Every structure is written in structure tokens, then in C-alpha cells.
Amino acid sequence: MTMTTQLNTQSGIAGNRKFKLPPEVSIALVLLGIILVFELLGWIINDQSFIFNFDRIKIIILQMSVIGIIAIGVNIIIITGGIDLSSGSLVAVTAVVGASIAQASDFPMALFPSLTDLPWIYPLLLGTLIGLIAGIINGSLIAFTGIPPFIATLGMMVAARGFAKWYSGGMPVSGLTDSFAWLGSGANPVFIFLILAAVFHILLRYTRFGKFTYAIGSNRQAATVSGINVNRHLIIIYTIAGVLSGIAGVLTAARAVSGQSSMGNMYELDAIAAVVIGGTSLQGGLGRISGTVFGILILGVMMSGFTFIRIDSYYQEMVKGIIIVVAVVADQYRNKKRRA
Amino acid sequence: MIANHDALETKSGTTSDGIPLLEISNIHKAFPGVIALNDVKLTLKAGTVHALMGENGAGKSTLMKIIAGIYMPDKGEIRLKGVTVKMTKPLDAQIAGISMIHQELNLMSYMTVSENIWLGREPKSRLGFVDHEEMYRITQDLFDELHISVDPRAETQTLSVALRQMVEIAKAVSFHSDILIMDEPTSALTEPEVAHLFEIIRKLKNEGRGIIYITHKMNEIFEIADELSVFRDGQYIATCSSQEVSRDDIIKMMVGRDITDLFPKQIVPIGRTILKVSDLGLQGVFSGISFELHAGEILGLAGLVGSGRSNVAETIFGITPATSGTIEIDGKEVRISNCRQAMDHGMALLTEDRKDTGCFLGLDLLANMEAPVLSHRYVKIGFVETKRLYDDSLRMANRLRVKTPSLFETMLNLSGGNQQKVLIARWLLTEPKILILDEPTRGIDVGAKAEIHRLISELASQGAAILMISSEMPEILGMSDRIVVMHEGRATGILDRKDATQVAIMDLAAK
Ligand SMILES: Nc1ncnc2c1ncn2[C@@H]1O[C@H](COP(=O)(O)OP(=O)(O)OP(=O)(O)O)[C@@H](O)[C@H]1O
Ligand SMILES: [Mg+2]
């Protein structure tokens, strides 16, 4: 009897937010676990520490920050239920084109002798602009022709790689200025990655733009009926991803002090892997940038760890493949649990 | 463990004609933060219809999903013809002779009607391929037997919600199960289909099958049910014969207090014309629709399935822009080619199919409520005013008595009726000038229904203009100032409140 009366007097929904562990915590724990395993293996195999090695941490973070920048855009796209396969190829295009206006005047083989000795901002802006145009093309194709994002960006992936090879004539674009090299030096790429991650994390969580992104990914028809201009929103999102790929491409060239058409190979897959590992659902409607940052770190630590315990790079690729599949299976399982 | 509500308890389960088809006892089921079922029981006898009643979130669907092998109970016993069974997956239940019509439509849009019905059970040719001709033939046989006129080859997405519901019913029957569970099968049907469904149910009953029937429509109970059980807040309240209880008894058992069933409409002065539709048409669907909608007015839109009621609403709201005719708002002609434009003119539309065009099932309640209103309010330089929006959403959700642990609960975890309330709250938050409601109280319990009617009435008294589609006669007769009746894409008449009767509407609807 007491129970019944209690239930009847219960009035309405609790106004205060109950504390729930953020989803990032579990991903962070996975990261910690992986680090511990390598630390242990490190002492067994190499007789040295894995993680208490500043150089190694620096290399992991530097390497992954470029892919991290791409992964931010890929994450937003996957939240809408789409996919972007073109980011790696866009890195190649913007690396060679960016580098071509970053050459020094004392370099005899400059592609554009009249456009030499420019400060770093020019190649960066040009790379961004190219990424923007490619993104608009991706987005418009998807929004207006209704072809699946997989196909649209696959086309862009192949075409952009071809463009990069044609533009550079298959040769590295070198002889770059010190100003340009500075852009990719030290911790600059890391800073840029972290700033972008913070900006887009806030954008997704606290702005109308972000709320609409999740709505579209969750139920496109319902989003349309709710007055959201889905086509325009998708174009903007693919454009953002293009711009981020452009920035990543210029940074890649700056870090290597050379632009090459082979750059960014398979980056799109690394980015997708990081996003999925970071807890974003391929079904759309679910995911956070903070999760992706952890996803990136997990990927970086694993690759670095395999090298550290001297596992052949072939095995590394295989293991990477397995990790992606496991992450997707985990996502399916989570979905099922939410449904049950 | 729980004290019995012995006052209303009647003797059940001890039938003279032997063992009941289904006997469940002592069932418990908890979800994170919610006890969905707490020590419930149910007994279904062969050849009877057993109605299950209870408020939104009482646990009806959860219990049915346990019987159908979709959820596992935390505790409890299920006996089929006296034998205790343990079902861990839907297939177990199917083999045991149980089939279920779910509360939400579950057909695959891009597959044909036949493919949907025989999914996983397709007739095969000798080489092991699906024999499509045979499949169409057996579907046609099934439809003939049930008197359903749907083309077995039609793609499901071309069917109206009501016809899709009929296909679901045919599918459930096609298993030839001993036990059929029907979870609110009539929430999207108009009177003729309901009558049709009842015929099917009577036929099944005569064949000795047992049917568990869930509904929020009281009059259906007395027409079709032999027995009924009532649940409240996950607890078993009572079982009785439907002959020996009154409507008020049932409501009292459901909500635990006396309530007025239908909210009496407030009569408010009718103001200026807000929306004027002239000769509106959508190629191949409807044409020549004209009416005026005034401030303070509730205009009912009635008609049978396929009459084009929902299409008119969708066209006015810009989902399917009109191909002919004009729309005037506040005396000015406007062009509406998408939903955003309609919203800019102060319109709101609650759509009929909450799963397809309503809910963001994977998102939380707050995200579900805020989507449209963010286009106009609660945003400063792109940033959402989280606190203010949360407070207003919470107030609205409480007003509509949404039953949930918090606004951060995932929409998917809510009961059907509570999802519907969230969607109504979504559109009320936009403070619309013109509110279009397509089956607003679909799946909503009696108590909450009265509250929603009160809200609609109140909105009208504040000067909003309301266009309401409903298949429920008492609702449309009780709420509307005037009623437009449609038949096969044309308006066949407009009735004034004083002339409107069920007969008058049905006359025009069948013209
Ligand atoms: N998967 C789930 N996760 C969490 N809570 C759930 C889940 N499914 C149901 N619930 C909760 O269990 C309770 C009972 O839900 P159920 O769907 O059985 O209600 P119902 O009686 O069918 O209501 P309605 O008349 O609205 O359809 C509700 O409070 C609901 O929020
Ligand atoms: Mg239900």
C-alpha cells in the first residue's frame, strides 16, 4: 500500500540533473589500459619505460594532430549520418598547391617564380580555400543530387589525388621558405589541433548549429519537418570538413618542408577510425569531439606502441583493421543495448 | 510483496473449461531509473479478447514485449497451456504460437507489402530462390480471407498509415498463432477500419484463439473485450469481466482518482480570419480545398482513410508544396515551399506518424523538444540559451504529464503515449499562431487527453487558430467549432458545431 501512495503522489519530472558519467570516461579508461599494457611490455621486452619518455609522447602527439584536425570534420559528418572519404586526397592537393606558393626566391626550380618568398599565411589561406571549394562540391553533390555521401566523396577522393599528381608532375614541391617551415615546426600543429577541437566541441554542444546537426543525423525527415534546412546544413558541414582537410594539408607540407602528391595517403581511414573509436555512432545522431580526441590518442599510442615493442608495420596495419572492426561492433552493441 | 488491491479484485484464472492459453505471474521488469513492471499477472483464456488498460507508461507494452520474447523479465513465470516456458528471443515466442502487432509501425518502407509480410518466411522455389509469384499469391489469399484491399505488390511507403496498420494486422494473422497481441492497433484507424478489424478479431476468437488487446479508447472495450485487466505505474490493479464494469470504474482503476473524461470545450469568441485557403490542390492527391480559419477557432478536418486529410495539412505546412490554389495568412497571399517558411508565418504541425516524421529516437527529450523553436527563439548569436530553454521545456513536459525520470532520458525509452506528449510539447513551445494537429491524442491515455484538450482550448482562447485532424469522433465533435469533411481528395462539406453529428460526418465522408 505504501508503495502505491508513494507513486501516486510523485509529481512530475525531477528538475535537477542527475549526475551521469560522461561517455568520454570509458574511452579515457581504454586509453589508460592500452598505455599500461605497453608500459608492461616495454619493461619486459625493452627494459625501458614506454610512457615516461618525453620524446615519444611528443612524436605521438605531433603525428596525430594532423589526422586529428581531419577527424574533427569527419566526426561532424558522421554525426549527420554521412561519411567523408576525400580528406586524405585533399591533404595531398592542398599540400602541393600550398607548397607551390611557399617556395623561396633563391630556389631555382620554383613553380611560380613571381610568387616566391610569401609569408606563411598565403599558402595557408590558399589551402583553406581549396579545401572549402572541394567541400562545397562534396556537400552540393550530396544535398542536391541525393547520391550517397560514400559515393560523392569517393569520387572526390580519386579525382583530388589525380589532381595533386598532375599539379606536382609527380615531383616533390620543395625549396620552401623558412616562414612556411615555421608553421609546421615545434608544437604549432598541436596548438592548431587543440584550438580547432575546442572550437568545434563548443560549436556542437552549445550552439543551434550543433543541435541541428544531431537532429539531422537522428531523423532527417523529422528534422525537415522541424523547419531545419537540411540541404544547406549538409553543405555547410561538408565545407567545414573540406576546410579542415585543407588546413591539415598545408600543415603536412609545412612539417615536411615539402609538398608531395602522395601525402595524406589513408588519412581518411585513420580519421574515420579515430572517430569510431571515440564513440561516434556510424548510424548518426551520436558523438562528441572530445571522444574523437581520445580516439586520436588511442590510435597514436597503439601505433607508437607497436613500433616500440618492434612489431612489424604489416602487423600494425592488420591490428589497426581489427581495432576499427572492434570499435564498430562495440557501437552496434551499444545501440542494441540502448534499444533493449 | 505488494499489497493487493483487493477491493476491485475479482476471481480470475479459475475457468471451468480447463487450462488457460496463457498465464503469467509475478513478473518484474526494471530499466535504469524506472521500475516498469512490479509483480504483475495476467491470464488469457482461449477464444476470448482480454483488454489491457492503463495510463501512458503503465507498463502495458513492456509486458507484451516480455510475452513476445523481446525483453526478458527480471523475475516471474510464463505458462503456456499450463507449461512453464522461458523465451529468450522473439523466435521462441513465434514458435510457441505468439505473434504481436507493435504499437509503432515496423514495416520496411522500400519493400513490397508481400515481402514485409513474409520476411524471413518467404516461399522458395525448388532452386532455393524466393518465389515472388507464389508470395504474391499467398498474400492475396490472406488479404481475401481478411477482406483487405491492398495490392500485394505495392511498395509499403506508398501506403497511408492506416493501410500500413492493416498490413501489420494481416502479417500478425498470417502466423496462425494461438495468441495474438495487439498493442493499440486502432490508434491510426478511422471507424470503418476499426469495424473491419473487429470483424477479424471476432473471426479469430471463434477459431479459439486468445487476443490481448491494448487501447486507450474506452468504447472499444465494451464492444470487443470479454475481460479486462488494469495496470497502474507498473503494478497490477485488477481483472474483471467487461460486462460488469462501467467506463468510470475503469478510469478510476487506471488513474486512481476521479477525473472528467473529456474536457468540455471553452466557447471563445471567433476573431478575424488568420488562414485562408482557396482552391488548394496537390496534383493527383487532392484538389479544390477552400476554407477559412479564424483566431480562436478550432476547425476539425474529418474524413476516412485516404481522403487526403493529412495531405492537406502537409501541403499547408510546406512538406509537399501545393501545385494549385493559394494560401493567405492575415490577408496576405504567401508562398510556402518548405516547413521553415510555414514556421516563419507562425505555423506548427504535429505530424501523424511519430516514428517517421516526429521523433528523434536516439536523442534525449530536450533535443526532441527544442528542435523547431530554436529557429526563432532561445538563441543568442548562435548559442542556445540552455537554462531558459531547459526551464521552459521542463514546465511544458510537466504540464503534459510526460512520465520520465528526466529530460535527459533517450526518447526511445519512453512509452508511446509519452513520446506523443513530448512531440505536442515541442510544438507548443513555439507558441504558434496557427496550430495544425494530425491525430493529436494518438496513443494518449484518458487523463492526459483531457489535459491536452484543455491546452488546445486554452490556446484557442488566447487567439490561436487551430486545424485539427482526428479519427476519433468524440474528439472531433467535442472540440471543433466547425468541421470540414473530406472524401477522396475533395471537401464534401463544412458542418457547424450545432449541426455536427457522427451521422452527418459519416454521410459526407462517404459521399
Ligand atoms: N527500453 C527502455 N528503457 C528504459 N525505460 C523504458 C524502456 N522501455 C520502457 N521504459 C519505461 O517503462 C515504463 C513503461 O513503458 P511502456 O511502454 O510499457 O508503457 P505503456 O503502458 O505501453 O504506455 P503507452 O500507453 O504510452 O504506450 C515507462 O515509464 C517507460 O518510460
Ligand atoms: Mg505502449
Image: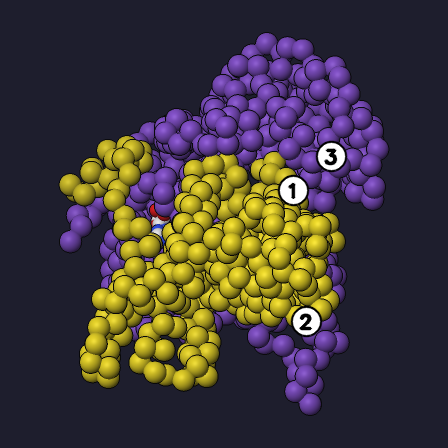
Chain colours: A yellow, B purple
Q: Which residue is mark 3?
A: B337
Q: Amino acid at mark 2?
A: Gly
Say which amino acid is labelled 3: Ser
Q: Residue furthest bottom?
A: B127
Q: Amino acid at mark 1?
A: Arg
Give SS at disc 2: loop
The N terminus of chain A, quarter of image: top left
Q: Nearer the viewer, mark 3 or mark 2?
A: 2
- Rendered view: A194 above or below B112: above
Say which quadrant the C terminus of chain A sits in.
bottom left
Residue at x-position 44% and y-position 56%: A185
A228 lies left or right of A58: right
Q: Nearer the viewer, residue B367 or B28?
A: B367
Q: CA distance from mark 3 to mark 2?
A: 50 Å
Residue annotated with mark 2: A170
**Label 3: which secondary element:** loop
**Can residue A252 be seen?**
no
Residue B346 image offset from top left, x and y in percent: 61, 23
Task: Identify which residue, A26 or B199, lies in the foreground.
Answer: A26
